[in-house]
Image (tube, helix red, strand yellow):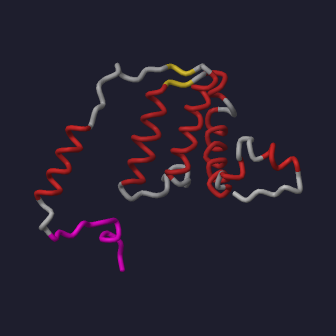
Amino acid sequence: MSEKPTNPKDAVGIRKVPISCLPVRVLWRVGLAMMEGALKYGRHNYRAAGVRASVYFDAVVGRHLLSWWEGQDIDEESKLHHIDKAIAGLMVLRDSILQGNWEDDRPPRQDLDLSDLNAHAGMLLDMHADKKVRHFTIADTEAP
C-alpha cells in the first residue's frame, strides 16, 4: 500500500476495517442469495429466531459446496451459483454467532491431529512417485 502524506485522514483511514478489499461482484451475488432467503423466510429472520449450526452446516457443505464440487455450478431451484449460496449461508451462521442467538449443536469435540495421516499421505506419495498417472478433472466430462 502506498502512503499519501497530503491528507491526514489517510493515516487514520488506512487503520479502519477495509471494505475496499471485498470483491464487489461476489457481494452482489451473495446479496441475491440473501434476497432469496429473505423472500423465502423473511428478511433477517435469522436474527430474530436464531439458527442451528447443523442446519447451516448441512446446507453450506452438504448441499452447496458438495454439489459445486461434483460439477453442478448452479442451484437448480434458485438458479443461483452454489458458491454464492454457500457464502450466504456462512454469513447467516456467522451473524448469528456474533449475535449470540445460535444453537451450537455441533458434535462433541474430538482430537483433530492430522499429523499421522499427513505423514501417511506423504509416504503414499513417495511410494508412487515413479508413476506417471493421469488425473481426471471435470474437463474430461464436458463435450468438446
Q: Which quarter of the figure has residue 113?
A: top left
Q: Residue 38: x and y, percent?
A: 66, 37
- Give the number of callouts: 0
In depth, the one of 9 and 137 nearer the eye is: 9
Q: Is residue 21 above or below residue 132?
A: above
Q: Is residue 107 above or below residue 27?
A: above
Which residue is found at the position 31% from the left and 66% from the top? 137
Q: Residue 22: x and y, percent?
A: 65, 51
Which residue is found at the position 69% from the left and 57% from the top? 1
Q: Residue 21: x and y, percent?
A: 67, 52
Q: Is residue 6 left or right of residue 52?
A: right
In depth, the one of 87 and 144 nearer the eye is: 87
Residue located farthest toward the front when viewing the structure as drawn: 5
> Mainly helix, strand or loop, the magenta region?
loop
Which residue is found at the position 88% from the left and 53% from the top? 7
Residue 80 shown in magenta: no
Magenta stretch in the rendered image: 132-144
Q: Residue 122: x and y, percent?
A: 20, 51
